Image (cartoon, helix red, strand yellow):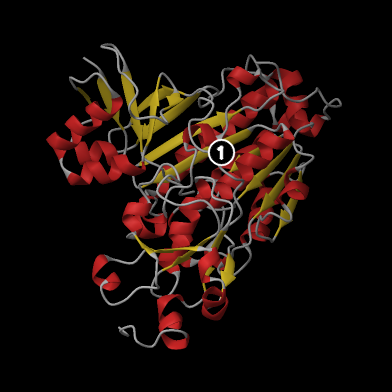
């Protein structure tokens, strides 16, 4: 693959001494090292994956690194986030990361951003880099990164870990590759999976070492893209099972047109929805459809007149919006969280006119229809 | 016969990383697998991405040829 980054200025004696082991590697050499020095990488997340990525990119002499993370170092992080130290507990991770990078390699420029990545800042934060490393821990942010990089024409090195398992891929956009080869996270997971399908490391655990192994692979992908060496994980997904220490790969191509109803761009968690109060809903009851995603036992205690009573689990299996009439939809459950999950899924299927009932059925019973059973 | 390849939670639920299933469509193959391995696999498959020759399978009624390999990838996001 053609190197992503142009050769930069000549290296001085310090740099040549520091990077000598790279200079000796065919495919990298002095030219490759000068490309690394000229490269600019944005690392999203200074956690499990971010730790090894940041250390190895810094060690490799990537000239300019931005790290963005809004979180602070927590005790449970230290099981795997080897960038941070016990004395850094409570410190912003982005700053702790910058400190570790500077200690390792003062020759490079590191820009820490203590911030969440969201709709408002994503283009500003990611623009101007040669590639992005996705070291985040939730799908919403991953889609934000992936969708924005596809729009900006920037490669994303992506990986996800859980327990003993990892998936790793490098997504190359147009115009860097031809349309028929350009992939993004959406070609692998087109729709936001429901939260209960994607346990986080804090729910299900992760082998600390795995983040080191996978993050190191991600750093390697970045180095290969920048220098043109080797063969990055483009058009394929690496599946790593560290329990058996076996790796497999599956091919990845762009998803077929119309594979899913066009998925709207992700917003960062939590998804934002319009809210409608019970009084507002009562006033325009005939103009909207109501979807009540509680369980049948709860439905039996009373419904909003004319509501579609369909449990959440069933809604989450829908792959299109055929079960619903067209037009504005108000989603409700007892208090709100299940309605939010259902609405998130419906949005990913392309529904463009969703609101959540503020306070759910509890509020409706309180304010509009006290004849319904409180529970 | 077509082959199903399972990864992570799918492999755990199926008790295997790969198996041949006699079926001529994606949905028939999944039904047979769920029949054999139970509701836990059903739940994982419901949320997984299916890839056939590297392409996401949006329409599970699509046909399967004898030498097709269907990959089952559960989503995870940890980092």
Q: Where is A291 relative to B65, above or below?
A: below
Residue located 60% across and 56% down the image: A268
Chain bearing mark 1: A
Whether residue A87 sits left or right of residue A312 in the image: it is: right
Q: Is residue A135 visible?
A: no
Front residue (pair A241, A301): A301
- x then y, percent, for residue A99: 68, 56
- x then y, percent, for residue A81: 50, 53
Front residue (pair A228, A336): A336
Front residue (pair A9, A231): A231
Whether residue A184 sits left or right of residue A129 in the image: it is: left
Write down the residue under mark 1.
A262
Q: How many marks?
A: 1
Residue located 55% across and 68% down the image: A89
Q: Quadrant of residue A90?
A: bottom right
Image quarter where the N terminus of chain A lies is top right
| Badge 1: residue crowd in 10 Å (few <14, some 14–19, many ≥20) | some
Residue located 49% across and 45% down the image: A349
Q: State the SS at label 1.
A: loop
- x then y, percent, for residue A7: 81, 22
Extreme-left residue of the structure: B36
């Amino acid at each position: 693959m053609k190197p992503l980054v142009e050769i930069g200025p000549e290296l001085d004696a310090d740099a040549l001494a520091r990077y000598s082991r790279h200079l000796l590697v065919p495919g990298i050499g002095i030219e490759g090292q000068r490309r690394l020095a000229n490269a600019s990488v944005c690392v999203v997340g200074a956690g499990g994956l971010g730790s090894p990525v940041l250390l190895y990119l810094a060690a490799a002499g990537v000239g300019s690194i931005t790290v963005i993370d809004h979180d602070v170092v927590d005790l449970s992080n230290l099981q795997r986030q080897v960038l941070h130290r016990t004395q850094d507990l409570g410190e912003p991770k982005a700053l702790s990361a910058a400190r570790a990078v500077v200690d390792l390699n003062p020759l490079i420029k590191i820009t820490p951003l203590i911030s969440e990545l969201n709709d408002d800042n994503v283009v500003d934060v990611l623009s101007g880099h040669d590639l992005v490393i996705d070291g985040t821990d939730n799908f919403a942010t991953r889609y934000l990164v992936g969708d924005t990089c596809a729009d900006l024409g920037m490669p994303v090195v992506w990986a996800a870990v859980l327990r003993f398992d990892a998936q790793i891929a490098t997504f190359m956009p147009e115009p860097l590759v031809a349309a028929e080869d350009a992939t993004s996270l959406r070609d692998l997971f087109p729709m936001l999976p429901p939260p209960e399908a994607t346990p986080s490391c804090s729910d299900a655990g992760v082998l600390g070492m795995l983040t080191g192994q996978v993050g190191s692979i991600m750093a390697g992908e970045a180095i290969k893209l920048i220098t043109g060496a080797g063969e990055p994980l483009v058009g394929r997904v690496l599946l790593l099972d560290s329990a058996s220490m076996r790796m497999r790969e599956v091919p990845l191509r762009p998803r077929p047109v119309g594979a899913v109803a066009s998925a709207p761009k992700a917003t960062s968690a939590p998804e934002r929805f319009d809210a409608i109060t019970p009084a507002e809903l009562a006033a325009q009851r005939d103009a909207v459809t109501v979807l009540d995603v509680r369980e049948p036992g709860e439905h039996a205690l009373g419904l909003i007149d004319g509501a579609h009573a369909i449990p959440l689990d069933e809604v989450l299996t829908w792959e299109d919006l055929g079960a619903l009439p067209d037009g504005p939809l108000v989603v409700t459950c007892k208090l709100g969280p299940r309605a939010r999950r259902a609405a998130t899924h419906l949005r990913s299927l392309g529904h463009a006119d969703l609101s959540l009932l503020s306070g759910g059925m509890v509020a409706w019973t309180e304010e509009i229809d006290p004849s319904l059973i409180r529970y | 016969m077509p082959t199903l390849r399972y990864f992570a939670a799918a492999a755990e639920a199926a008790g295997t990383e790969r198996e041949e299933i006699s079926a001529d469509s994606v949905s028939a193959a999944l039904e047979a697998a769920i029949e054999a391995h139970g509701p836990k696999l059903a739940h994982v498959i419901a949320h997984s991405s299916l890839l056939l020759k590297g392409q996401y399978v949006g329409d599970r009624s699509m046909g399967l040829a004898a030498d097709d390999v269907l990959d089952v990838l559960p989503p995870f996001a940890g980092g």
